Image (cartoon, coloured by chain):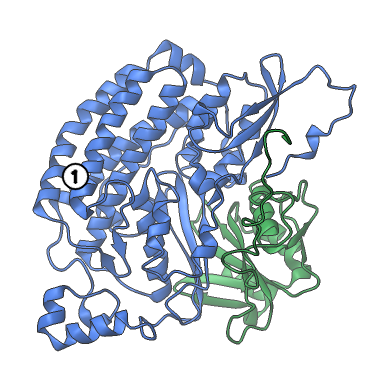
Chain colours: A blue, B green
Amino acid sequence: MSLAPSLERPPQSQDYLWTLNFGPQHPATHTTLRIVLELDGERVVNAIPDIGYLHSGFEKIGEKLDYNQYVTVTDRMNYISPMANNVAWHHAVETLLGIELTPRCKYIRTIICELARISDHLLSTGAMGLDTGAFTFFLYAFYQREVIYDIFETLCGARFTNSYTRVGGVMHDITPQVIEKIRRFVKTFPATIDDLEKLLNRNRIFVDRTRQVGVLTKEEATNWSATGPVARASGVTRDLRKDEPYLAYADFDFQVCCATAGDCFARYYVRMAEMRESLRIIQQAIENLPSGPANIGVDERTTLPSKAQVYQTIEGTITHFELVMLNRGFTVPSEESYAAIEAPNGELGFYVVGDGSDVAYRARCRPPSFIHFSLFPKLIRGHTLSDVVAVLGSLNIIAAELDR
Amino acid sequence: MLDALKTRLGDAALSEFRGQSRAIVPRDDLASTMQWLKDDQGFDLLVDVTCVDYLSYRDAEHRFGLVYLLANTATNERLTIRVYLDEPDLAVPSMCDLWCGANWLEREVFDMFGIEFRGHPNLKRILMPEAFVAHPLRKDYPLQGRGERHNFPVLTREQA
C-alpha cells in the first residue's frame, strides 16, 4: 500500500492536473482495490494502483494447514471460479507427491474446471457489460451462473466455496443427477451465448467504448508476464491445456481462442469464444466419462477410504487410521515443485515446498490477477476516466486473489 | 538448452525433479545468466518470482532461496532458477529491465521477505502498509503477527 514517487511532483510543473481517488470502496471496482488517478481534464495521465486492502496472509496460512485443509483457503482466492483453484492446488500437491490420478478423476476435474471457466467468463464479461452500461447482458449472464451453481451444489453440497478436490481424488464421486444436470446445461447454454453475443458483439455503445481502448501488443503481453485470455487477446497462442496437457485435456478436440487486436473488446471476444470451446470439452468429457473409482485405491494411502471400506476391510481401517493420526499422514519428499493449470484468468500455479510433514513448508500461489493488475497503469494511460472501468473489467481483477 | 546450461553453470548446479529442470545460479552471475537465458535461449516469459525462507528447513545450508520460474513460449520449455542468499547481504540485481512483469513480483518478495532488488524502479511495500516493519512470510514471524492488528491505532472522527 504505497504510492509511487510520481505523485511527489514539483509544484508548478503540472499543477493543472487533478488527482482523483478511485476506490477502495467504489461499486465499479467490484472488489476492494484503490487507484489514484491523475487527470488532465477527463484524460488519465497516470494511474497508481494501491493494493493490499484484502491481504489476509493466505500463503502464511498455507504453512500451517495440511495439504487437504488448505483447499478451503484456495476457494477464497479467486472466488468466482473456486473449482479451478481447488484443482490447481491439488494438481501442484500431486505433482510434488508424484501421484497419478485415476482416469475418472481426471475427467471429473476437467469437467469442473471447464464449468468454472464458463462461470468466470460469464461474470467477467457480465461485469464488464454492466460497467459499460449493458445491464441486460449482466442479468442474462448471471442467470446462467446460477445454473452452474446448482450443478456444483448437487455435486458437492456447496454453491460457492466448493472445496471439492482432495489429494489423490475428489470429495466424492460424480452422481447420475449431476451428469443429467450438466447434460441439460450443455444443451441449453448455447442459446444463451447466442443471445449474449447478439446483445453486445455489434452493440454500437459497447463497441465504441471498448475498441482501441487499453491496447496491449503481443510482445508487451509476454514481457509483462500476462497469461490467459488477456495474453490470448493480444495474439499470444500459449494455452497450458494445449501446450502442457494436464488432466485429460489431451483427449479432447478443442480450439485455443485468440485475437490480435489486444484491446478491451478483444479480451471480451476471446472470453466469449472460450465459453463455446469449454462447452465442447464438457460435452466430450461427460459423454466419455470413464467408469471405475474416482479416488486412487486404499493401498496408496493418500485418499480417505469410503466408510464401507473402513468398517468392512482391514486395509480400509489401516488406511483411515494412517491418514487420520497426527504423526502419520502420507509421505512427502523434501523437495520443491511448481505446477500450474490454465485457470479462467490465466496461468494459476502453486510453488510447493515439502519438508516431509503433511503441511507445506511454503505454498506460493502465482496469482494471475496480481500480474494483470500491474499492467493497468500502462493500459489506461492516455484514455478517459470512463475507460477506467472498461479496462478494469476486461482484465477481470479479483481482489481476493490480487492481495491473497 | 540443458547442454548449454550445463556448460555454462557446471554439472552440479543442475537438478531435476518430476521432470522439472532446475538450476542453481550464484548471485554474482544472476544478471548475466538471466540476460543470456532471455536473449539467447528464448526464455521470454517470467512466470513468477518467489522466495523460500529455509530457517527451519532440515539440512538447509542457506537462509533464503530466491526462485525465478521461466518459460519459453515458443518451445514450451520451463526452467527454475534458484539463487541462495544469506544474511546480512540480501541484495540481488533487479530483473525489471529484462521483464517488465518482474516489477510487482519483486516488490512482493521485498515486502514479504525483505530481499533487496538493486536497480528496481520503485522498491516499496506492495501488500503490507508502508509503516509495517517486519517481513511476514519469514519463518521467524509468527502466524498471528506481533500484535500489529491488536495495537492498531483507532482514530475517532475528531482526530481524522
Q: Position of residue B45 (x, y in %)?
A: 58, 52
- In the foreground, A237 or A191: A191
Q: Is residue A92 above or below residue A211?
A: below
The kind of residue tagged 1 is Gln
Q: Is residue A2 left or right of residue A358?
A: right
Q: Is residue A130 left or right of residue B109?
A: left
Q: Is residue A359 above or below residue A3?
A: below
Q: Position of residue A115 (x, y in %)?
A: 28, 45
Q: Which quadrant: the N terminus of chain A? A: top right
Helix, strand or loop status at disc 1: helix
- In the foreground, B142 or A367: B142
- In the foreground, B122 or A15: A15
Res B39 visible? no
Q: Position of residue A71 (x, y in %)?
A: 38, 61
- The residue that appears at 72% across and 62% down in the rendered structure is B114
Decide: few, some or many residues near mark 1? Use Cα within 10 Å; few <14, some 14-19, many ≥20: some
Res A403 visible? yes
- In the foreground, B148 or A99: B148
Return the chain for callout 1.
Answer: A
Q: Position of residue A294 (x, y in %)?
A: 19, 66
- The residue that appears at 26% across and 21% down in the rendered structure is A195
Q: Is residue A23 left or right of residue B39?
A: left
- The residue that appears at 67% across and 75% down in the rendered structure is B7
- The residue that appears at 49% across and 65% down in the rendered structure is A62
* Count of numbered tags: 1
According to the picture, the residue beneath numbered tag 1 turns out to be A283
Residue with the most extreme top position: A204
